[in-house]
Image (cartoon, helix red, strand yellow):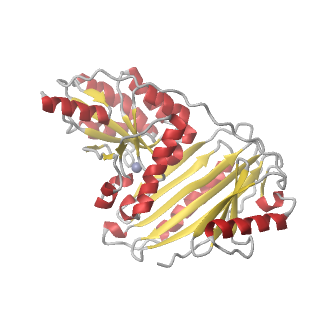
Amino acid sequence: MIILILVTLLEIIYFINMDNYSYYPHTIIEEDRNYLVTATYPKTNTKLDNDIEKFIIDEINRFKNNIINSKYLLERNELNIDYDYFYFNDRYISLVLKISNYNGKTKINNYSIVSCLYDKDKNVYLDILDLFYDLDKLFINIKKEFKDKENISIDSLDKTYIGLIDNKLVVYYISDNIYYINLGIDNNFKLNIVKSTKEEYEEIRNTANVLDPSKPTIAITFDDGPSRYTEDIINTLEKYNCNATFFVLGNKVSAYQELLKKSIKNGNEIGNHTYNHKWLSRLSKNEIIEQINRTQNILKDTVNYTPTLLRPSYGSVNDRIRKNTNLDIVLWTIDTKDWKIHNVDRIVELAIRNIEDGDIILMHDTYKRTDEALKKLIPILLDKGYQIVTVSELEEIKLIRSKL
Ligand code: ZN
């Protein structure tokens, strides 16, 4: 298959003032009969966000304008934008976005890379190559690394995109595919790079709920997070002494690790919702494994937690996915449609309308309305006599009941 490459370069100049470097990853997810869109990008609480957001929205609109109606779900076009690298220190912000645009009819995937480097002190976007004393030496190093690692000969830096991470560079090269290498930078680099220190892992103890198999039981699940609304959702659950299962995206884990630790400590369960929300059923075996394992690994490395549950993005499951994971695949029995419905009461109504013992409710901890709906939903469910537990606890209760 020929992979067409589309290259876009983000050229932005903005004057901004950044005192606070805190950021969080933000995700836009849209699904329609004819398309699937997932875009994840960092929000930095600065004017830089306007540029990134405008770029993302333009990409999504351009994608939608090019869509041709498809007859089958398998032919749906898919746009996936994810930040491959996002790095900042006290002076620079480096962002590399990877855009994959899948045409369902022709089965061709177009990739493109967008990168930018922002200098806080000078209030400008920089060409990363301007940061080197000796460009020739840099080029020789990059060339050698691509030859050694990927067996690719590159003849200029024109087709490269560079991101800055810790004490190294990541260099993307685009030819028939996207390749990248990591390059250590030390003396030949002009910048004073602050090396990030490895965090001490915190021992997290699960505070297990007392499960009552005789009570009607339901599980509430949240997909696509964490987000800025997750903390309030965790607090609401804590207030009512309930727990839920959060199916998280791997690319959001490290930014929210403190929140995840708190969530786990409170007794909530973390499930795997893939790394960046691609539609798994048409990925290759290796791509499926990568989507799942990258998320498992980052959760293990950052919060010392190993999920046992997988909820595939968009709820799409096939035999290839089942064959390539030993995680339990969990879908849902009640869809609150909170990703589409804006009315809080309507979301609550959809959750409780047909609810029965053993149900699994689908929500998304990425919307304020979901946060508000949960505050109404939990008291109603508790009033009806339900205990609200994680998916694994629900399974445990079903197992206990089957033995009674
Ligand atoms: Zn999802």
Residue 274, given in percent of the width and then of the height, sits at 43, 50
Judged from this view, the residue extending furthest toward the front is 148
The residue at 49%/60% (across/down) is: 80
Q: With 103 as the anchor, is 191 left or right in this view?
A: right
**Which of the 4 image quadrants contains residue 217?**
top left
**Number of on-image labels:** 0
Q: With 219 as the anchor, is 84 left or right in this view?
A: right
Residue 36, given in percent of the width and then of the height, sits at 42, 61
Residue 154, given in percent of the width and then of the height, sits at 70, 74
Judged from this view, the residue extending furthest toward the right is 133
Looking at the rendered image, the quarter that the C terminus falls into is top left
Residue 117, given in percent of the width and then of the height, sits at 73, 55
Of residue 245 and residue 141, the one placed in the foreground of this image is 141
Q: With 127 as the anchor, is 152 left or right in this view?
A: left
301, above or below 137, in the image? above
316, above or below 353, in the image? below
Q: With 33 as the anchor, is 276 left or right in this view?
A: right
Residue 127 in view here = no
The residue at 56%/41% (across/down) is: 254
The residue at 62%/75% (across/down) is: 175
The residue at 39%/47% (across/down) is: 339
29, above or below 244, in the image? below
Of residue 383 and residue 238, the one placed in the foreground of this image is 238
Residue 348 in view here = yes
